[in-house]
Image (cartoon, rainbow, N blue to C red):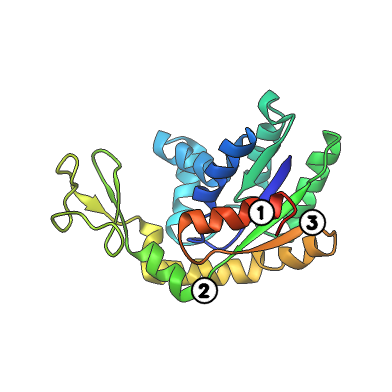
Amino acid sequence: MRLVLLGPPGAGKGTQAAAVKDRFGIPHISTGDMLRGAIAAGTPLGWKAKQIVDGGNLVPDEMITEIVRERLGAPDAKRGFLLDGYPRNLGQAKSLDIILGGLGQKLDFVLCLHLSDAEIVARLSGRRTCDACGAPFHVASAPPKAAGVCDSCGGKLSQRADDREEVIVRRLAVYQAKTAPLGAFYKERGILTEIDATGGVLEIQERLFAALSGGG
């Protein structure tokens, strides 16, 4: 099964992608995770990506496409994959067609999670992460016992630069301008399924699995 998971930042793509990976035994290929790994490692690619991401913008197409091309050629992706964070625009979608064509493959499904802008801002702006151990918190849904302090290790909790409200608004504007049009692109091919991303994690997961099994 070869899948693409679309949706605005904060819609829960990473969480749902992990569930799909476990259910179908295919690799979850997240360009965001790959970029964050490069940033954490301080590589030249990571340094360039950090400047772009911290400003609420997207990294250049050619940078992401080369990462994806290499990853899809790996042995574990031969029998299926779930792409999360790529493609983000029509140019990348066409590049993905070329990559898959070269591998003798094609997409089976494109799933698009939908969530209101207000809910997205609330979800993302409330996230906090421990600087020391990486434990996640949320000021509304999963607050720490003491404000700004990690329950696990006592470390300081911080907000990611791209989770500030003003940056989120810019990210959503970029999504609407660049990524949202992919819905029509894949709908014309008959492989797009739209998923309501409101509610709890398990509710959304059930809708997603129903779509993949032909029941949604």
Decide which of tag 3 and tag 1 comes sooner along the chain.
3
Decide which of tag 3 and tag 2 comes sooner along the chain.
2
Instruction: Write the residue at 85% across / 40% down.
Output: 101
Tag 2: Cα neighbours inside 10 Å, few (<14), some, or many (≥20)? few
Instruction: Write the residue at 46% across / 72% down.
Output: 169
Quarter placement of the C terminus: bottom right
Tag 1: Cα neighbours inside 10 Å, few (<14), some, or many (≥20)? few
Kind of residue sitting beneath label 2: Ser
- Gap between marks 3 and 1 measured at Cα: 15 Å
68 left or right of 205 in image: right
- Gap between marks 3 and 2 measured at Cα: 23 Å
- Gap between marks 1 and 2 measured at Cα: 22 Å
Secondary element under disc 2, as helix, strand or loop, is loop
Secondary element under disc 3, as helix, strand or loop, is loop
Residue designated by label 1? 210
Residue designated by label 3? 191
What number is the disc on residue 116? 2
